[in-house]
Amino acid sequence: MRTCIGCRQRAAKRELLRVVAGSDATTGGPVALPDPDGTAPGRGAHLHPVTECYELAVRRKAFARALRLAAGKGEGSPAHRWVTTSPRDSNSTDRPEKKLEQQLMSTR
Ligand SMILES: [Zn+2]
């Protein structure tokens, strides 16, 4: 069991998205990266892969605490994009993360 850093509820690890601290591909700055396979090394945090929990985590500055990212670094991060394009609440047809979604689906 892991605790979601957004809503603070406990859930099975497979129901949560692991997020790790990483470097932004363009700026090199620290950002929250999605780690759906749970294999990335280093400091990680878990949250439900839904927009609500992501935004809660940003508001609680949970990324700053859990990943040692500067406050506010959560918005617009790769993890944020991953969460907002997850199957549950996306109606977009432009989904570059399709492969990740399929991987996630296949492990359910
Ligand atoms: Zn949650």
Image: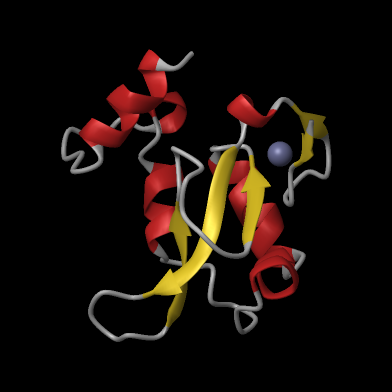
**Is residue 92 in view from this perspective?**
no
Q: How many marks?
A: 0
Q: How is the image coloured?
A: secondary structure
Residue shown at 22% from the left, 33% from the top: 98
Residue shown at 60% from the left, 51% from the top: 54
Q: Position of residue 38 (x, y in %)?
A: 51, 42
**In the rendered image, which quarter is residue 44 located in?**
bottom right
Residue positioned most to the right? 9
Q: Position of residue 16 (x, y in %)?
A: 61, 35
Q: Establish if 20 lies above or below 50.
A: below
Q: Position of residue 89 (x, y in %)?
A: 44, 30
Q: Quadrant of ligand 1?
A: top right
Residue shown at 30% from the left, 35% from the top: 100
The quarter of the picture where the N terminus appears is top right
Q: Establish if 74 lies above or below 15.
A: below
**In the rendered image, which quarter is residue 14 located in?**
top right
Report the front residue among 50 and 21.
21
Image-based side of 52 in relation to 8, left or right: left
**Is residue 93 in view from this perspective?**
yes
Report the front residue among 79 and 106.
106
Q: Position of residue 61 (x, y in %)?
A: 72, 70
